[in-house]
Amino acid sequence: MDKPLPPGLDPRAAAVLREIVEQYVETGDPVGSRTLSRRLPLSLSPATIRNVMADLTEAGLLFAPHTSAGRLPTEHGLRLFVDGLLQFGALSEEERETISATLEARGRSLEDTLAETSSMLAGLSAAAGLVLAPKSEGAVRHIEFVPLGTGRALVILLNAEGQVENRVIDIPPGLPPSALQQAANYLNARLSGRTLGELQRIVAEEIAANRTQLDTLSAQIVEAGLATWTDEGRGGSLIVRGQARLLSDVTQIENLAAIQRLFERLEAQETMLRLLELAEKSDGVRIFIGAESELFGTSGVSMVVAPARNAAGRIVGAIGVIGPTRINYGRIIPVVDYTARVIGRLLG
């Protein structure tokens, strides 16, 4: 069933606005009255269409770039289109199965799965895909330390949900394997279903009180291994793929410096937290056009983001796409929505 028309738009104005936005999404070029008269299902003359376009321009829904006779939607016009005129369908069963199979492939670490998710979103949306997984607060089942060569070791963590995460740490050169094994034995003996934060507090207290049998080198490994996950500055994993797709459409965005600032903000810790806050305020997909997210303050860029919730309804991450304002909303919204549901299951 068609949506009711947005307030202030009659059927002719709604048809013109919809067609201009759809052409803008497809080509990025201004749309003129003659093009509209050929494409609109309504029998309207170019003169009538020009009058409607003039009214939409006066209402702040369209604008004329430079001296072009054609029109493009403003961010306000795009918002009106997304909220009241956009028609999008559900993903096909085949598309759902493809997304699920891609993300649920066995044998990958959690970090690799999140990276694959971001890359998949970038490919499906022709924009930049982002995946945010907050720092795990669940219980830890097992920790191992594996030497990687001079001065480095791999820390392998298995959580209570069976997810495996890997981190690389620096260790003193020439460290004997026995020190790595001692560090792992010490930590595994104290796990008992504790979270990493709880484990770090216990270890810190024992080391401070000299209540451990660890030698100095093993104690350094224990502290470094825990810090790779419990450092409050990390806050989680934010993975962005497909930046080149966004940059390739930079002509539709104010300037290259704005995109550079956007990427810098994506790397900032506070941005991760804000993304989660934005996702948390909605049960489903949220669309932010231009500067209205108050996250990037960048016009010419849109973001579609959805919360990833586990079976208990708790938010365990956020999934989204960032691209120029002419991204294909009708295609991207159901993709982001379904991907967020799959990742919610995977993150537990």
Image (tube, rainbow, N blue to C red):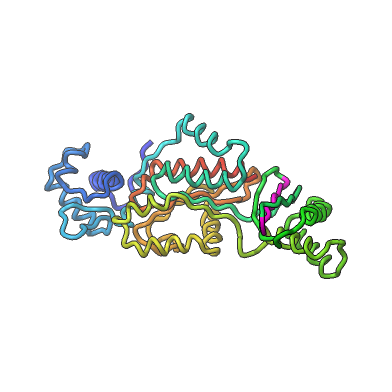
In which image quadrant can residue 296 be found? bottom left
**Depth order, front residue of 235/61:** 235
Image coordinates of residue 113 in percent, x first then y, are 57, 44
Q: Is residue 1 above or below residue 240?
A: above
Give residue 276's quadrant in the image.
bottom right
Q: Residue at x 75, y 64 (%)?
A: 220
The N terminus lies in which quarter of the figure?
A: top left
Q: Nearer the viewer, residue 140 or 151?
A: 151
Query: What kind of secondary structure does the magenta stretch mostly adopt?
Result: strand
Q: Residue furthest top?
A: 94
- Tell whether position 156 is magenta: yes
Decide if residue 347 is on the left or right side of residue 194: left
Seen in the image, is 161 located left or right of residue 344? Answer: right
Q: Is residue 10 visible?
A: no
Residue 175 in the image: state x and y as whole percent: 74, 58
In the image, is residue 8 part of the stretch drawn in magenta? no
Residue positioned 39% across, 54% down in the render:
302
Asked if 290 appears above or below 42 in the picture, the reply is below
Q: Is residue 52 above or below residue 2?
A: below
Residue 240 visible, this orientation: yes
Magenta-colored span: 150-160
Quadrant in which the C terminus is drawn: top right
Residue 11, position as x, y percentages in the image: 26, 44
Q: Please indicate whether residue 162 sits to the left or right of residue 40 in the image.
A: right
The number of callouts visible is: 0
Q: Residue shown at 36%/38% (left/top)?
A: 2
Q: Residue visible at 66% across and 52% down?
A: 148
Q: Position of residue 182 (x, y in %)?
A: 81, 55
> Farthest residue in the front direction?
174
